[in-house]
Image (spheres, rainbow, N blue to C red):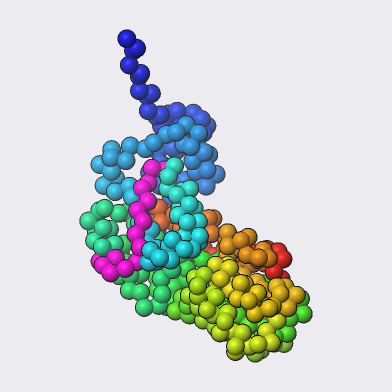
Amino acid sequence: MPEPRSTPAPVTLEEVARVAGVSRATVSRVVNGVSTVDEELREMVTRAIVATGYTPNRAARSLVTRRAGAIGLVLPDEGRMLGDPYFGRVVGGVMDVTQPLGVQLVLTSAGTGTHQQVVADLRQGRLDGVILIHTHGADPLPRLLIESNLPVVLAARPVRPMPITYVDVNQTAGAALAAHHLADRGCFRVATITGPVSTTAAQDRLSGFRQAMADRGYPDVVAVEADFTHEGGATAMEELLVRCPDVDGIFIASDLMAHGALPVLRRHGLNVPDDIAVVGFDDSSPALACDPPLTTVRQPVEEMAAEMARLLLGRIERPTRPVSAVVFEPTLVVRQSA
């Protein structure tokens, strides 16, 4: 009769400390999300956690800290979540930080009842804090959380000034990169397809592009609004060709919209980039799926999402810490479309 297999003993803090080359106290501080740990030490401990397979005892830790050991990630409606690779990249970046620490990530999509549910989950201790993705100017949730003094980080500059911690990319600088690239190619009749102008990302990309084109001597930029979706990009391109039939350079404010727009150009007998140069924004998987592969402005989504998670955990640990803004710089990735 075979002997029963013994269950491997759980990895201890001491073992993690030995692998990381730090003290047990340092490992404990990292696992508990203490924000004052030196960043280099935090990275060493995180690597050791992954290498040893250490799993924090969330239930025991919750008894000591009186925390849920869980944070929320509030995404747009489910249809957009499934269709846009941006959101999967955000989830991956957040989990790079939370998973090694044993912090559970709870996903929810915006919709009826979401605001009240998020506030209730925080007040009743089911969540320790939340990250909000893509809010618009009329969204009351950021203000509700601020007024309730609950830990929150926003994944964009707020539409209206408010005391909230946020992470963003320099949207105007990214759009300016697109403008200068099109101008350097010799494009003189330039247009843009924007995202929904109720969002700061769309507003800043539009203003940055227009200002940079004006600086290069082209103040007349036709703009068509879309919704950051594949279908929206296709529809907007049809409208743009009616409004601006002699266009020779287009900045499309997301790769996903560009992926929908490029087939429209082909149907109208226009070659990219010989007839029309096209630049996108994001450097996501649709950029490589475009035909031809899309020249685009890269925003480091995974790094930005990881920073959101770190900032939120810091606010959970020390709720009185001042609000802050972290802005990443974009880069231009040149491919075959422009």
Along the line of sight, which residue is nearer the eye, 238 or 306? 238
Residue 43 is situated, as x and y percent measured from the top left of the image, at 52, 43
Residue 281's image quarter? bottom right
Q: Is residue 56 magenta?
A: no
Location of the C terminus by quadrant is: bottom right
Quarter residue 251 falls in: bottom right
Query: Does the segment drawn in magenta span residue 112?
Result: yes
Image height check: is 211 above or below 14? below
In the rendered image, residue 257, in percent from the top left (x then y), is placed at 55, 71
* Front residue of this view, candidates 148 and 94: 94
Residue 164 locus on image (x, y percent)? 40, 68
Q: How many marks?
A: 0
At 57% from the left and 82% from the top, the residue drawn is: 238
Q: Is residue 326 above or below residue 138?
A: above
Q: Which residues are magenta?
A: 101-116
Which residue is located at x 67 percent, y 84 percent? Answer: 247
Q: Position of residue 322 (x, y in %)?
A: 41, 63
Asked if 248 appears above or below 89 in the picture, the reply is: below
Q: Quadrant of residue 62?
A: top left
Is any part of residue 234 visible from this angle? yes
Q: Residue at x 47, y 56 (%)?
A: 88
Q: Is residue 295 left or right of residue 67?
A: right
At a point 61% along the width and 61% down the height, the residue shown is 289
Residue 119 visible in the shown view: no
Quarter of the image where the N terminus is located: top left
Q: Going by the image, does 220 lie left or right of 112?
A: right
